[in-house]
Each structure stands twice: as structure tokens, then as C-alpha cells.
Amino acid sequence: MNCNIAVIKGDGIGPEVVTQAMKVLDAVGEKFGHTFNYEQLLMGGCSIDACGVPLTDEAVARAKASDAVLLGSIGGNTSTSPWYKLPPEKRPEAGLLKIRKELGLFANLRPANLYEQLKGACPLKEEIADRGFDMMIMRELTGGLYFGARETKEVDGVMTAVDTLTYNENEIRRIAIKGFDIAMKRRKKVTSVDKANVLDSSRLWRKIVEEVAKNYPEVTYEHMLVDNCAMQLVKDPAQFDVVLTENMFGDILSDEASMITGSIGMLASASLNETKFGMYEPSGGSAPDIAGQDKANPIATILSAAMMLRYTFDLDKEADAIENAVKQVLVDGFRTCDIVSEGTTLVGCNEMGDKIVERI
Amino acid sequence: MNCNIAVIKGDGIGPEVVTQAMKVLDAVGEKFGHTFNYEQLLMGGCSIDACGVPLTDEAVARAKASDAVLLGSIGGNTSTSPWYKLPPEKRPEAGLLKIRKELGLFANLRPANLYEQLKGACPLKEEIADRGFDMMIMRELTGGLYFGARETKEVDGVMTAVDTLTYNENEIRRIAIKGFDIAMKRRKKVTSVDKANVLDSSRLWRKIVEEVAKNYPEVTYEHMLVDNCAMQLVKDPAQFDVVLTENMFGDILSDEASMITGSIGMLASASLNETKFGMYEPSGGSAPDIAGQDKANPIATILSAAMMLRYTFDLDKEADAIENAVKQVLVDGFRTCDIVSEGTTLVGCNEMGDKIVERI
Ligand SMILES: CC(C)[C@H](C(=O)O)[C@@H](O)C(=O)O
Ligand SMILES: CC(C)[C@H](C(=O)O)[C@@H](O)C(=O)O
């Protein structure tokens, strides 16, 4: 198979972790007989520096012309970087929001699971960590407060800011369908999260999710209020399989879920549109403090590449090969500094990539 | 002193926990020479049953005429109770939103602290729990998505729902001032939480908080994004003193913070307006499953009464007396079933009230 991948290394640790993921992809290509063609594009701070904007229209067009996007990370230190002196719509993050919208990436999949070998890093107590957990946060990514109209203006001499949270039934239906589809391939449970006791958009959300659920009689589903969900994630994460929610709630809950694993450096993510096209990126940030020091954990990016093989290219065997290599490397005791513990072997970003390549 | 208190026992465990708080207040009154006059009002499900609406205008008027409101809890089982067959604006929760707005209770104070004796209940690992934590979530309560315009209608044949998130500078300023004022009485640190990389309302929030901060040179303050805050609460709760945030973020984060204590039955809350007037209630819900069984933990409500003495009536000594009695009862090993553990003595709701009264 011939795979055309737009590669956006981005800022901070982005370049070094993406380099490792490309190395792993090439090893997979060699073993299974595929060719990965990479086209590098700029987004975020590096694009601001080179082109004056966080994402050019040309980069968008090229990303669109590719089969999938592999992204590292974008942004820098918000208090010291000159990028954050710019108006909001010119900052690195604006590039990320623009590419999500332009590519129609409405379905953001964020797995949060506890690796047996990394239980020690879990901030929850043993009793809870021992039960383990493995959930998929399915976050709507192109609607809600992120993309509604907003305005700041004086009203009777008083500065007033307005953001709008809008969803229509089609936007809700397509993400709900993705959520139930994914649940069918997992443990067949969906927890739809909203704030239906307050928001109109949540009440519409609940109604449409109920309609979609009718077509999935095998899937158990429940509604949960967002405040309760924030509690349940800490109290009993094992209860969750697929968590389906709107953009802002998903932002908050997926970060909370990633933290309770204790190893964000292990968490991949995928952002999909209605076709097989997707953008794949690690869940963590650009970590400017350790950038360029060969300290970053490349596993989240490598696992994002595995998700790309699975969701965009339907290469399940190949994705399994990467995921198994990652598991093996943990079993063999290799750790980057974010997950190192007594009795394990500390390796750098590049060496971790090598160890995984060896196990493909 | 003569204190006129509007008492809203409400639904579920509300009546039994409020009864214990009144018992404790009366003991304080006797010891320190104050008279507490109670006027009972209806709100929530019991008001729907008796008056057809979750809160009558008359009840609002009487609450306004009182010095403070002591609230139990409202609402029932959302899947079985007939209250939840009603349209949203007639459900129990609508009463709560109405009283907050009508009484102008814009500042919601939700303490989340770990009791030395209850560390075992904390869902976080020992290493984190041992460091302890004691924070005050200061949530804006009468603005934002909760009270903005909302509408669901067909747009080109597609059902579309819109909620609006509005804040003006005055609303932000008054809650920020409350937050910094409280910080001055605590460890002098404010973490203001927003989503300024996306929302206009958050950017205005940040600007006004910065202005207010200038008047509190002794207070250290920082801005934190809401997704990051959801992570930090789990990773390192000890870092927080006052957490200042808008209505919806505060709803989510305060519940997350209450869960990491592992003992919601211990957590009080206060909702204040611009004067000394306030409404005081436990952080937990109405727990219909254990209502009327003498199993509920009354301590959150008793500590809410202590907050009332402190914030509305300036009776600090008396508030201390209640808080110390609660601590002593824990030291003496008495526990309701939500916090019981090996080697402690299980007591019911009423007996817990008695034990605290004995220690006033
Ligand atoms: C950078 C920011 C705009 C973004 C978001 O809020 O979506 C990030 O937090 C994420 O979750 O990918
Ligand atoms: C019942 C509900 C409307 C309410 C809220 O969201 O404010 C509750 O969750 C709370 O936090 O007091």
C-alpha cells in the first residue's frame, strides 16, 4: 500500500517525537510491504515564525490532499514566548482550531487506559488502580463554544463578552453514530455526558443520542451529567467504556481522564472526519521546557501512528504490530523519564524509538 | 443576637440533615446566648407536590426577608420520579436556579479539604493524600451559560439549539473581589481558571482579574486553563488555595474537587450576595436512595450552618465551636456509613447530630 502522510512536526518536543513515529512507520512499511510518503507542513509557532500565520491556506490544501495527518504538538511557553503577545486569532492554537474546522475533523477519539506496567504512576489509590480502566473519550471537535459566534463590546458603557454554544441535530447525530460504532468494537457501553438540567444544547444532545441508540440494541447506554462525570472519573474509572460528549466538556474530561492514567506520554489521539481521513497526535502538549533534549516520551506519537494505520488505512495487523511492540518495550523495562521508576531502565526519546523499531 | 433563618429542608435526605443542623444551632444559641428563629419554606420536589411549581414567588419573598437561608437538598431520582417528567423549567432544579438568581447569590464558596482522620477515604494515592489539601472553590453563580439566552428551533429544517455564555466586567469584578478577599483570609493565593485560548468571555475574565489583582499586592495569583486545572486537581491538589472561576467551569471543578476529598458528606457550601446575606447548603445531593433511613451524613449541613454564622452573622467564635465539635467527633471515632472504616464507630444521622451537640 502507498500511504501519503502530511507530517506536521510543530513546536516544542513535536519534531523529536514525530521523528520516532516516522522511524517506526518505516519499520512497519519494510516488514509488511507498504510505502509511507511524507510531506512536511508547518503549523503553530514555527509557521508564525516562517509565514506570519499559524497555518497557511496552502498548508491546509496540502493536508487535504494527503491521506492522513500526523501531528506532533504546537505552541510554546505562554508566559515567555513572543507568540503569546499576538492577538488570539494569530497564536499557535488558532492553527489547530483552523485545521480541525477546515478538515471537518468532528470526531476526536482520546483513549485513556492504564498500562499494567505503569500502575505505579497512577495518581489514584491502589484499590482503584488495581481494577484497571480502559476508556475512549469521544469528543465532538468542530462545534459548540469553540466555533460559535463570539463578541466583546460595550453595552451601556460596560464591557460585555458573549460566546455561543450551538449544536444542531446533524452535528450531534454524526458524532453519536461514531460513538456507538466504536462502542460496538469495544465493550459495548456508551456514557453520553451533558448538562441537560441546564442547557438547551444538552437537551437536544440527549434526544438525538437516544434516537441513535435505538439502532444499537446491543449497546448499553446511559446519560450522565458533566459534573457527576468529573467525579466518577476519579471515583470509579473502570465503569467507563466510550464516553461521548460535546467539545468543551470533552476538552475538560479527556484531560482529567488522561491525568488519572498517570502517563500522558502514553496517550494517543485521533481526529476523524466523515471519510477515512484523520489527524493523529499525542494527547500531551508541546512541553517546551524539555524540547530538543532527547527526553520526551515518543510513545504517544507512535501509538497515534498506530491509530492512523487502523482508522485511515485499515491496516489492523500493522497497527497491532506497533501496539504490541510498545507493550513489549514496557515489559522489557525501558522507560523515558516521565514514566521511569525503580528497577526500570531510563532511555531517551531516540533510544525509545529504536527499542520499539527492534520489536516490530 | 436574634437570627432569622429561612429553612428549606427540601427533598431526599434534606429534612433529616437540616434537622440535625438546627439542633446544633440551638445548642450554640443556648451556649452563647443567641436566638435562632426558623421559618420553613418549600423548594424543589416538595414544592412541586404542594404548590405545582418548584419555588413560589411567596417563598422567594420570605427568603429575601430573612437574614440567611439554610438549605438541605432538592430533587429526586431522575429516572423514576414524576418530577422529571415535567418540562425543565418546572423541575426541582429550576427552583434552585431561580432562588440563586432572585437573591443575587453570585458568589458560591465550596471548600474542599481533606480531614486527617478521613485520609483513608481519599481516592488519590497515599503519596498525594499525605501532603493534604485545603482549597476554596469560588464559583460565579448567577451568570454564564446558566442564565444566558437559550433557544431550540428549526433552522432550514434542522433542529438547532443555542445557549449563550455572557459575562460583563461588573459581574467578573465583583466575584474576583470576593475571591481575593477570601484569599487574604487564607493562604493568599488565587488560581483564576478560564479557557482564554478559546473564549471571549474568558479573555475578558482574565483582563478583569488582572485589574482586581493589582489591589491585592500580597496575594499571589496565576491563570490556569480549565482543562489543565481538571488535571492538576488530581495530580497535585495541595497547590491550590482559592480557585476562582465562572459558573459552568466551577460546577465541574468543584464537584471534581469534592470527590478527591473522598468525603462529600463533609463538605459545606455558601452562596453569597453583595451584602451579608447568604444561602448555605451541603455540597452533596439529595440521595433519594437513603432518604428517611437515618443513614445520611449531617456534617456537611452542620458545617454549612457554621459558615452561615461566620459569613452572615459574623459569629466567628460560634462557628469555631461547631467546626471544633465536628473535628472532635471525628477524633472520637464516630462515623456515618459514608465514611465508616475499620476501628471506627458507626452512627446514624440523628446520633451524629447528638454527638456534635454534646461537644459544643
Ligand atoms: C489548545 C486548545 C485550543 C485545545 C482545545 O481546547 O481543544 C487543546 O486543549 C486540546 O484539547 O486539544
Ligand atoms: C442542580 C444543578 C442545576 C446545580 C448546578 O449545576 O449548579 C448543581 O449541580 C450544583 O452544582 O449546585
Image: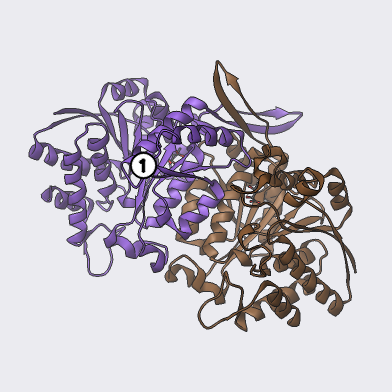
Chain colours: A purple, B brown
Quadrant hosting residue B219: bottom right
Q: Tell me the residue that label 1 is attached to.
A: A183
Give the structural element (helix, strand or loop) at label 1.
helix
Q: What percent of the width, then of the height, locates residue B169?
A: 69, 38
Relative depth, front residue between B166 and A180: A180
Q: What percent of the width, then of the height, locates residue B232?
A: 48, 56
Residue in view at x 12 percent, y 41 percent: A27
Residue in view at x 23 percent, y 41 percent: A306
Q: Is residue A116 visible?
A: yes
Label 1 is placed on what type of residue? Ala
Chain of the residue where label 1 is placed in the rendered structure: A
Relative depth, front residue between B129 and B39: B39
The relative height of residue B112 versus residue A138 in the rendered view (above or below) is: below
Residue in view at x 79 percent, y 66 percent: B309
Relative depth, front residue between A310 and A224: A224
Q: Quadrant of the N terminus of chain A?
A: top left
> CB of residue at label 1: within 8 Å of ligand 1?
no
Q: Quick one: which residue is furthest to the top in this view? A: B156
On screen, residue A31 versus residue A245, left or right, reads: left
